[in-house]
Image (tube, rainbow, N blue to C red):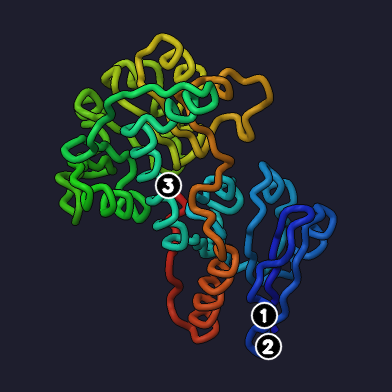
């Protein structure tokens, strides 16, 4: 009997589509910490949809039979605690499920600022008929920090509309829809050329606080920052200061640090900032899509085949 444990947030329903699994598989869904502690030692496969900070690390048993952990997210930073990283179990993620939704969100944010939609809404609320000129996005330069699966889909949509797209990754390479992909070390050289700086990178020791006061100062004053990666890639206080001083034209933030953004935080009231609740990839039906992706990988597991979307646990 293969025992699968699904960790969900308190009050969250089980993933739809996991009701029927192959014979010989037992599935249990838990949310309470006490249940998690009780079930983990006898679990073979752990599916995580609840990424409460530190919960899994606190509950991780000294002795267990877990062989595979699957994260229902693209980012796995919340799971990279020492006991898991140093183990020989497999870690997979939901790469591919959220790519198009996030890319469409980024495209919407680019258009939002180019067409001054925030300004339109302010004038509408004030009942002001205020004619203005807006920007064309064709020919604008987009810098995508994180040229992986999500970054590649963002590049595809922006390239289709005529933007010149540069990616930043661990190493330089060529890829479809990018004019170029440069190594991380070239980031500071690319920032002054960018009209839109788009963060799609996961949170790692190398990306934490990557966008700080010094790098924000390198961006042109007309540039817009779009963050759909992880909030902690950007130093929030430095971003607030740059926006207050007019060093940036604006920001679209689907992720923030801290998250959720507390009541009264200055970002809430800034007229040139759009904030969403870490939802850029969550299209209608996304939870069922996650379940179907896991079930397809489970079939491979039961057949003794290699798993898709394996994540390197030790990374910089």
Q: Is residue 7 left or right of residue 115?
A: right
Of the residues under marks 2 and 1, which one precedes in the sequence?
A: 1
Can you say which quadrant of the picture contains the C terminus?
top left
The residue beneath circle 1 is 2
The answer to whether mark 2 and mark 1 are in CB contact below 8 A is: yes
Q: CA distance from mark 3 to mark 2?
A: 41 Å
* Residue at 20% across, 42% down: 163
User: Dot 3 corresponds to which residue?
Assistant: 105
Between residue 43 and residue 235, name the one nearer to us.
235
- SS for tag 2? loop
Q: Secondary structure at mark 1?
A: strand
On residue 24, the disc is: 2
User: Disc 1 and disc 3: Cα gap in Å?
Assistant: 38 Å
Q: Is residue 3 above or below residue 95?
A: below
Q: Farthest residue in the bottom direction?
A: 23
Q: Quadrant of residue 1?
A: bottom right
């Amino acid at each position: 009997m293969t025992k699968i444990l699904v960790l969900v947030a308190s009050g969250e329903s089980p993933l739809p589509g996991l009701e029927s699994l192959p014979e010989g598989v037992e599935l249990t869904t838990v949310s309470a910490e006490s249940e998690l502690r009780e079930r983990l030692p006898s679990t073979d496969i752990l599916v995580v949809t609840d990424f409460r900070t530190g919960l899994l690390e606190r509950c991780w048993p000294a002795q267990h039979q877990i062989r595979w952990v699957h994260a229902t997210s693209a980012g796995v930073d919340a799971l990279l605690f020492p006991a898991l990283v140093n183990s020989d179990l497999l870690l997979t993620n939901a790469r591919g499920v959220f790519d198009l939704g996030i890319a469409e969100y980024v495209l919407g944010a680019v258009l939002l600022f180019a067409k001054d939609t925030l300004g339109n809404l302010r004038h509408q609320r004030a009942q002001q008929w205020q004619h203005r000129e807006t920007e064309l996005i064709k020919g604008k330069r987009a810098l995508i920090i994180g040229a992986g699966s999500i970054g590649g889909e963002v590049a595809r949509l922006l390239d289709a509309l005529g933007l010149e797209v540069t990616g930043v990754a661990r190493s330089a390479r060529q890829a479809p829809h990018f004019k170029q992909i440069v190594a991380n070390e070239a980031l500071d050289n690319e920032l002054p050329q960018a009209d839109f700086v788009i963060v799609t990178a996961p949170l790692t020791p190398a990306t934490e606080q990557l966008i700080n006061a010094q790098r924000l100062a390198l961006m042109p004053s007309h540039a817009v920052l779009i963050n759909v990666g992880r909030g902690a890639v950007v130093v929030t206080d430095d971003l607030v200061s740059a926006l207050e001083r007019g060093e940036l034209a604006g920001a679209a933030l689907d992720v923030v640090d801290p998250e959720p953004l507390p009541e009264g935080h200055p970002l809430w009231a800034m007229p040139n900032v759009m904030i969403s609740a870490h939802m850029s990839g969550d299209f209608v039906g996304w939870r069922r899509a996650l379940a179907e992706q896991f079930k397809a990988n489970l079939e491979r597991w039961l057949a003794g085949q290699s798993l898709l979307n394996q994540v390197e646990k030790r990374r910089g």
